[in-house]
Amino acid sequence: MPSKSTWPRIHLPADRYFGPDPQQKHVALGLYEGVAGLPLLCPHGHVDPRIFADPNYTFGNPTELLVTPDHYVFRLLYSQGIPVEALGLPRRDGARVDTDPRKVWQTFADNFHLFRATPSGLWLTHELASLFGVEYRLRGDSAQYIYDQIAERLRQPDFTPRCLYERFNIEALTTTDAVSDNLAHHQAIRDSGWQGRVIPTLRPDGVVNLDAPGWRQNIIALGAACGFEIGGYRAFLNALRQRRAFFKSMGATATDHSALTAFTTELEESEAEAIFQRALRGAATASDAARFTGHMLIELAGMCLESDDGLVMQFHAGSLRNHNPLFFDRFGPDKGADIPVAGEFTRDLRPLLNKYGNDPRLTLIVFTLDETTYARELAPLAGHYPALRLGPPWWFHDSINGMTRYFESVVETAGLCNTVGFNDDTRAFASIPARHDLFRRVVANWLAGLVVRGIVAQDEAREMIADCAYGLAKRAYNL
Amino acid sequence: MPSKSTWPRIHLPADRYFGPDPQQKHVALGLYEGVAGLPLLCPHGHVDPRIFADPNYTFGNPTELLVTPDHYVFRLLYSQGIPVEALGLPRRDGARVDTDPRKVWQTFADNFHLFRATPSGLWLTHELASLFGVEYRLRGDSAQYIYDQIAERLRQPDFTPRCLYERFNIEALTTTDAVSDNLAHHQAIRDSGWQGRVIPTLRPDGVVNLDAPGWRQNIIALGAACGFEIGGYRAFLNALRQRRAFFKSMGATATDHSALTAFTTELEESEAEAIFQRALRGAATASDAARFTGHMLIELAGMCLESDDGLVMQFHAGSLRNHNPLFFDRFGPDKGADIPVAGEFTRDLRPLLNKYGNDPRLTLIVFTLDETTYARELAPLAGHYPALRLGPPWWFHDSINGMTRYFESVVETAGLCNTVGFNDDTRAFASIPARHDLFRRVVANWLAGLVVRGIVAQDEAREMIADCAYGLAKRAYNL
Amino acid sequence: MPSKSTWPRIHLPADRYFGPDPQQKHVALGLYEGVAGLPLLCPHGHVDPRIFADPNYTFGNPTELLVTPDHYVFRLLYSQGIPVEALGLPRRDGARVDTDPRKVWQTFADNFHLFRATPSGLWLTHELASLFGVEYRLRGDSAQYIYDQIAERLRQPDFTPRCLYERFNIEALTTTDAVSDNLAHHQAIRDSGWQGRVIPTLRPDGVVNLDAPGWRQNIIALGAACGFEIGGYRAFLNALRQRRAFFKSMGATATDHSALTAFTTELEESEAEAIFQRALRGAATASDAARFTGHMLIELAGMCLESDDGLVMQFHAGSLRNHNPLFFDRFGPDKGADIPVAGEFTRDLRPLLNKYGNDPRLTLIVFTLDETTYARELAPLAGHYPALRLGPPWWFHDSINGMTRYFESVVETAGLCNTVGFNDDTRAFASIPARHDLFRRVVANWLAGLVVRGIVAQDEAREMIADCAYGLAKRAYNL
């Protein structure tokens, strides 16, 4: 049986993630403390609204909460030759997988050293310590003891999503929802009288990207949601308009869009219609799909400017989805096998920006997985076009180094004012405080570096970190 | 009325821009102080020679000097939704714009916080304090007080460009001039007997790039300048040769060239002639233009090696000019709407380097806006070909982080010896000392980092910073 | 005659290459000291096995050892206009070059300042001091004195490669060998009874890349080595299999492959055969060559998985060989005129990874010269596919900044576990300890930065540096 006396303790120093210079660390700590208590704004994420709709929702066991659903976690374990079946990941074909949660947890703990110096490692450790009161580092020998600790905590009556929402001091939490979603969970939240602000975001990728899996079905569902059949391009646009209005009525302040590239192009309506008809017939080509998405991005930007819309437009470019067909066939999408490709924005976004980028009523927030575009393309573009803002470092770059590179590459050219603060972009609700805390600390350290080098004054840095932690997101997303 | 007691003071610490480690800071300060008094060499820039031709030239009001002409400034304000008309930027169509200089200044000051942590913010603050004696930070409440202070200073009789040239301790200032420019201002400077060294640089982009706006007119002007009609490719080459000789006779030591890409290719004379004839007929294609520029870059490198020429060749690649047609139509070129694109040099420069790159008599200085090419392509190329040198970090990268990334990416592979020091590349004459000072400080900090890590010795660092601040530019540009 | 009293001394502080913060430096030094004495694993390199086959092999004079064969050295001198003939580089045409070793050494020393802050400068200085006992910095005035010192040391009887192998504490040294090499030197080493582990690596580029110089001859040599004629694709595959078995029997644990891009594609056997036949007829096109290499990379990965093979596959992508034809014609290949090009892995490696990347029995180690692919493509890929590992920073990036950028870009996403430690990749046997020492120091400094920022604990950092210095390479290469 394990002997606790030999287990190393989790150490979360108050000055963690700050550079070692005593003067810089002192400034960083002061800046951090000034914003550590600010409410959390979560303007882009993937938490399931269902967990708030049911006031008594509980999280299940530690493995179900922390391992099986987290593709950041099983991705890395898989890369080291650990079958994801051994982590409880369900197979699409229904084949039996190892779902004894204690056994899965043990495998995870045995390999937790693989996460050293990764964001997942930092988030999980923070979460274990601050949310579950775990004192010992997760290792093979401490695994079952910690499992018990977490399980015990999960059974406590205040460990519901709604209680945690309040405990986390969240001011607004945004979900991401398919265009035909009836937002029943959001409605249930509203109906319940609970005061938490959980709002939807419209993500129409499934109908805008003609090569999306199940596009034909998605169009039918969209028509059903709208109460009319979508037999052509005009009806399609009208359906989108109707859904935008519906989402807005449910509290949405933004839409979200994703494509392999940032290619935009304006089509004649006749060409758009022809492509749409080909798609309905199942005859759209890859080029059709790329051109249609490129055209629709411009159309959707235009819709933001129509009266009574005013939704903020988010655009995530550059992820090649489902890189690994074997893995996809066995386990499905969104399982950590999406891989970035090089990006281009100067030429690709030009048609959209030329048409709508000079209008300050539009807010277009762009996210990239190609860091080379920060200083080369995105910061110069955002430092010119009134409509353009840069989203925070996305996905693999949501990390200490990723954030640091982002601020060091972007702000000199675009100004901090053309960034939009942080979003946690996560399915893992319980990890939200750890993610925001890490961001705030990295910003504090970056700004402290500017202060001690005489680049900004301390009072300026205080305003800048408050903007990063709260104000920029609040304003950019109209929250 | 504003109360000065509440205004924060400008703080320009002697050790600004240096890292916080006391040992490194001490070394950096020593290195900096060793070069702070060296004369300024300005081998590439855009100051108007007219301001030196007239011994009594004055700068107008503070807004005319510091806001309206600086596209670094109005670019960022525009990106935040401030109409550039409110900044006094004249419209091409002559429509009335807000030109009350005090009102424009107030708008600028109200928004000066947007420039936090940007080079423009640092340069302007340095300039305000050291050139105009401003003690308070520029804000909405201090705006008019500071306006008065600057205006007062601008009225003083020693505030002429010539006096400032001497006060700035400039040793040589290089302008950039169209190929058909008669260099009358430069001649006037010479004739005046004033000892300042203001020399021209030949920039033939307007005739070399067939798609340059007004190419046909430029060719006519070139012919007029040469005294013969340019009816074909041979005449064109001869005209260029004649202008090179003229510029050289007026003190020029360099030419400057710009293109969207670094593509070079050698054409048969017959093809060059055919393209040139098509251009004269207004029938040149985009491909013609790209091929002709690519060919002419090689031809121009060859001209450097002809007897009695010896001009240094500068090449700026990778800026997509006038990205925003609405803005261009309204306000014209060079207004901050040029956006970088990804670059390629290994393949693109190969034809030129294969033909002339082995000749140490040629100096080809390349500038890029794509930092990914520093370590990947340009440093390896410059570390091999005798003719190739790397220009300093250009434009958006003329910043603390940009310079730091440059030295950290380039020097390990190319050696410091294949770089060429600094150039300020500015239209804003009064900002020149601030720009050189920032560069020298960043170099001091970089080198101090090498010293304290035992990578170079202190006496070596002293030689290296003297090279960066003075020697490399002096030698590379034959100044 | 030179006066030693004025010569600066070499200073190699015990804490060199560590950041200046006292706390970080203390941690770094502790980490470094924990691994400084570990044996050296050299799993990829280009040392000539001949020097170990002859127990009495000696290194010649200082110039022959340190200047003439080192393209890192003459590359940079050439870039500054020094003819490589003056450095003793032999011309292919047999024209007389300056081969007085003392004169060449003097030129080298006169210009050694050019190597400030370059890896070559650091390696050479380390080598001079620790291997040859040189106390003074190499300069023009100290050149001949130091020449004598080195020459004296080279004459000592213990200065043989075998003695140095033991003195350097090398555990395994891997050479790189053409596919038809008879490995006679390796056999001689075995036969001699000497216990040093010098093992071959199979590099079949000369037969796999149809556009390799002398491909037809290489195929004939391969056939001769196998004892059968290679008249078609099947025979070609069988020949490769036979050579793999032979190399394995001689101790090889890995193969090495190189291509301009990472393009992979699976061909039908009929197409592979048709291309191979065209190549035999001298009629293969550039496209044929690219497709064949792309196909063979997949075939070769498959061979790793065949029973009794199990060789580790290394892949170096992105070097454009022999960029400078004039230089190539005069001096031949591998003379420092190979220049990197931008790389792509997400799409290019997909066919290979989709076919074999899910198999943990395969180890594919990828090297890139395009640092932008670290965080964007390679780390995400390696953090998913069980077969993929990332090689250490290659060539120009085998430097303090290059290694630092590598760890900062890769580990957050891929984990340290998907990297493979260090390899020195050098022809210069005597420089091996300096190279490993620099790597271990940079890792110590990187990890110390993580410790002082509370990202990893000190005991974790100790395990991580032991892995970087030894364990990762040992396991990845099955050494």
Image: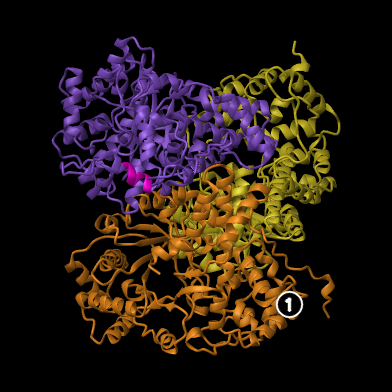
Chain colours: A purple, B yellow, C orange
Residue at 32%, 53% (x, y): give it. Answer: C385
Query: Which portion, as a residue range, is magenta?
Result: A105-110
- Please tell me which residue lies in front, B377 or A68: A68
Left or right? Give the position of C465 relative to C106: left
- Please tell me which residue lies in front, B356 or C257: C257
| Residue, disc 1 | C143
Residue at 29%, 61% (x, y): give it. Answer: C361
Is disc 1 surrounded by few (<14), some (14 to 19) or many (20+) residues within 10 Å?
Answer: many
Horizontal and vertical percent for residue A117?
48, 46
Left or right? Give the position of A9 relative to B445: left
Horizontal and vertical percent for residue A325?
23, 48
- Please tell me which residue lies in front, C62 or B329: C62
The chain under label 1 reads C
Q: Is residue C146 visible?
A: yes
Going by the numbered disc 1, the residue's amino acid type is Ala
Q: Quadrant of residue A66?
A: top left
Q: Vertically, is B465 above or below B112?
A: below
Q: Quadrant of residue B137?
A: top right
| Residue C150 lies in the magenta-colored region | no
What kind of secondary structure does the magenta stretch mostly adopt? helix
Horizontal and vertical percent for residue C262?
36, 60
Left or right? Give the position of C239 relative to B26: left
| Secondary-structure class at tag 1 | helix
Which corner quadrant holds the N terminus of chain B? Answer: top right
Horizontal and vertical percent for residue B128?
75, 30
Which corner quadrant holds the C terminus of chain B? Answer: bottom right
- Total labels: the figure holds 1
Q: Vertically, is B154 above or below A22?
A: above
Q: Quadrant of residue A42?
A: top left
Q: Which residue is situated farthest in the left direction here?
A: A281
- Please tell me which residue lies in front, C290 or B256: C290
Q: Is residue B384 visible?
A: no
